[in-house]
């Protein structure tokens, strides 16, 4: 699964969109569960941090043509690392600085985890 990033053709991008739609529905499903189950909504900041960081982390895996069922376990395996990356993006006004840094940080974290599982 350590494929190098490749130049995507239009058709390969369409295939990748299918995987991104799966990810979107997974995030929607988790968000709805947290929203509607009483008591579980206290976990929403943690879930938000994770999903924010996953967006930056996951791009590197998607560029290597990993499927959603490969990318999700990879993200969950490194849950605490992603949580640490995402927590800074919840702070008001700090996001102005942390968002561009998260792009670089997510990419570096993903490459590190791919090379040293």
Image (tube, rainbow, N blue to C red):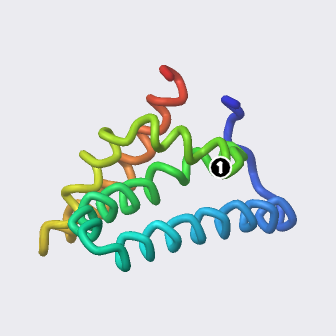
Q: Using the rendered view, name the quadrant where residue 79 is placed.
A: top left
Given the current orientation, which residue lies at the most extreme top position? 116
The N terminus: image quadrant: top right
Q: Using the rendered view, name the quadrant where residue 24 is placed.
A: bottom right
Residue 8 position, x and y percent, is 77, 56
67 with respect to 88 (left or right):
right
Q: How many labels does the image show?
A: 1
**The residue tagged with tag 1: helix, strand or loop?**
helix
Residue 31 position, x and y percent, is 42, 72
Above/below status of 81 relative to 2: below
Q: Looking at the picture, tell me which residue is in the foreground, 112 or 23.
A: 23
Given the current orientation, which residue lies at the most extreme front position? 38
Residue 37 position, x and y percent, is 35, 73
Residue 27 position, x and y percent, is 50, 67
At a point 37% along the width and 62% down the height, the residue shown is 52
Given the current orientation, which residue lies at the most extreme right position? 11
Above/below status of 36 relative to 94: below
At a point 35% along the width and 55% down the height, the residue shown is 50
Q: Looking at the picture, tell me which residue is in the foreground, 92 or 68.
A: 68
Judging by the rendered image, the residue that carries numbered circle 1 is: 63
Question: Local crowd at mark 1 within 10 Å, few (<14), some, or many (≥20)?
Answer: some
């Amino acid at each position: 699964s350590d494929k190098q990033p490749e130049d995507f053709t239009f058709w390969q991008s369409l295939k990748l969109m299918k995987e991104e739609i799966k990810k979107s529905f997974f995030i929607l499903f988790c968000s709805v569960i947290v929203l509607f189950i009483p008591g579980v909504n206290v976990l929403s900041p943690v879930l938000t941090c994770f999903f924010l960081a996953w967006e930056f982390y996951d791009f590197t895996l998607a560029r290597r043509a990993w499927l959603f069922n490969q990318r999700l376990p990879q993200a969950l395996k490194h849950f605490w690392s992603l949580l640490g990356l995402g927590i800074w993006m919840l702070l008001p006004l700090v996001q102005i600085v942390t968002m561009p840094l998260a792009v670089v940080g997510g990419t570096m974290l993903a490459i590190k985890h791919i090379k040293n599982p």
